[in-house]
Amino acid sequence: MKKQTNPAPKENQSATAADAPTGQSYLLEIKVPQAEPLLGATVRASTVASVQGFTIDPTFSPVPVKPSNTQRMAMLAASEDNQHVIVRATLTDEQRETAKANPDVIEIWTDAVIEPIACPIPPCDCSPNTPRGTINDVANYLGVNQIWSAGKRGEGIVVGVVDGGITATGRSLAPGEAPTRTINNVIGGWPVANWGTRGASWGHHGNMCATDVLGMAPNCRIYDLRIADASSTTGVISNALQAFQWAIDQHRTNGTPHILTNSWGIFNTASAPDYASNPNHPFTRKVVEAIDEGIIVLFAAGNCGDTCPDGRCATSGPGQSIWGANGHPRVMTVGAVNKDEQFVGYSSQGPASLDPHKPDFCGITHFTGYFNSDSGTSAATPIVAGLCALMKQGKPSATHNSIKDALIATAKNIGPSGWDQHSGAGIVQGKRAYDRLTKLLIKEAKIEKVEKSEIKEIKIEKNEKLEIKEPKREKIEIKEQKLEILEGKRLKDLRDVTKRVPELPIPIPEPIRNPIQPGQTVEPGGNDLESRLAQLESYIQALDTFISTDMRPDLSQGALANEGDLPTGQGTADQLTKEANDAMMNKMNYDNSPR
């Protein structure tokens, strides 16, 4: 989030819910029968409110949320099948306690105040107003220019910028709006009636975020999802809840937005402890729902790192700086470094309140983009969102998790070896992550093809030989079997696999082929060497498989894929062959020896 250095008043930093002024905004989670329309929640909530003397906010559209796991268990125990819906109301402390006792009210949540959101790994950059190059320099550092050369510039990808609003090119701007410039490629958003018309309430922070996305993916499209009030700098989590619901509904309609970037959060946990540390807060559940829907979701880590924290931070440093959905295990949590690979001293540090393994990685900040210096984890996050747009274009089937994994696996480490609580996995490397993700296309396409054909049965006719590249490249004859191919290379459930010993009978010198026939019985008192040879040849002729059925390991669990499964049977055959040859050579020497 863009770093602000003006310190917050001390009394604001220690405020508690009890100190909140009369009429604090809350989110009421109401249960409504499944058969009842969504607006039924408003009716039920209004009934509760009328009895207790408060009013449901008519400007807030009810938002459905999935019950938490704990709530599902309670519903099962009570044999209930309700939908959960969020409405907004203004309550005093007394009204809040009374409303909680109503059977239709499941829970009452804090409507947290949110704001736009920069040295443990020296040297730290604590100069957010000093750019370290331009946004084009960032693209070159990340290798994005090489992805552009391959023809990928974000075409067909839509990124939702959840922020304080964007002033879009081609839209009639609201009175008082005077942005440095308007933003191209904005095609829609929420609120539906006036997206793209305002952004001054957060100092055109949304214009900065959109610029940074387009700096990496210049041909992608943008949704403006404005979560700050039009007339003030105040934003509340309920606005973000509605914006995410709009994005989810839109995605169900046409598959967009593909990505949601969020460069905002909370700086004072005391006024919203349930949002800061409870994963069951309805907004946090809605974020998870968006990811489950198929949307890629990024959040800024925050600007409360302990070297030079933002002045608004009530707490800072490791374990005291990443709160709420910004640090949820499922999202991509983005810290900040500059182009010169210096850690930004205000970048928030893990562990997060909801996940000890945060942040995930760092994007680039402190460069000339929309402003002279786009700064904070606010700028770093849309930079990574732009990379995600290129990766999604390069591999349309890519998921939130596969893109996140590729970014983590290819990040450049700048701190202690491996993941660390300051920079996560390190600095994202755009081209390397793109290559890692897209080079799996061929392998995964084969898997998808097999899955779509429901793993077709491959029949190999009798006596047809299939060569499998095992450690010794043995030839294996497969009789009337079904072969299931999983993950491209793994062979599973090989049944009735047989391997003949090489071309029987074993070639032997012509002079001794006839004296002793396989299976011939030697008269008592006959030559012991000849008897031994006959027995060995008989064994070899009778040998049907390289491992008997009762001794063969269970190949249905992929045992054939392991090197240790073949040598035992092959060794037995090799040993018998050696003994037979030795015996025949001894026989030849005996026959040719002087008498």
Image: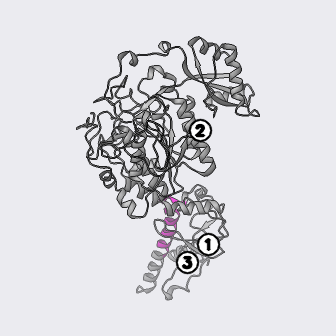
Q: Which residue is mark 1?
A: 542
Q: Which residues are magenta?
A: 560-580
Tell me what residue is drawn at x 58 percent, y 41 percent: 192
Disc nearest the viewer among 2 and 3: 2
Q: Which residue is mark 3?
A: 526
Q: Which mark is residue 385?
A: none
Residue 423's spot in the image, x, y percent? 34, 39
- Crowding at label 1, few (<14), some or many (≥20) Cα neighbours within 10 Å? few
Q: Secondary structure at mark 2?
A: helix
Please say if 526 is above or below 425. Answer: below
Measure the C-alpha gap from mark 1 to mark 2.
72 Å
Please say if 566 is above or below 163. Answer: below
* Amino acid type, mark 2: Gln
Q: Are marks 3 and 1 in contact (CB under 8 Å)?
A: no
Q: Which mark is residue 245?
A: 2
Measure the C-alpha gap from mark 3 to mark 1.
23 Å
Which SS type dominates the magenta stretch? Answer: helix
Verify whether residue 574 appears in magenta: yes
Residue 436's spot in the image, x, y percent? 42, 56
* Amino acid type, mark 3: Gly
Q: Please state, as top left, top right, bottom left or bottom right, where the C terminus lies in the image.
A: bottom left
Q: Quadrant of residue 12?
A: top left
Please say if 499 is above or below 199. Answer: below
Residue 551's spot in the image, x, y percent? 59, 58
Residue 316's spot in the image, x, y percent? 35, 26
Q: Number of callouts in the render?
A: 3
* Amino acid type, mark 1: Ala
Q: Nearer the viewer, residue 225 or 515?
A: 225
Query: Is 141 left, or right, of 59 in this rendering?
Result: left
In this view, the residue farthest toward the left is 123
Tell me what residue is drawn at x 40 percent, y 38 percent: 205
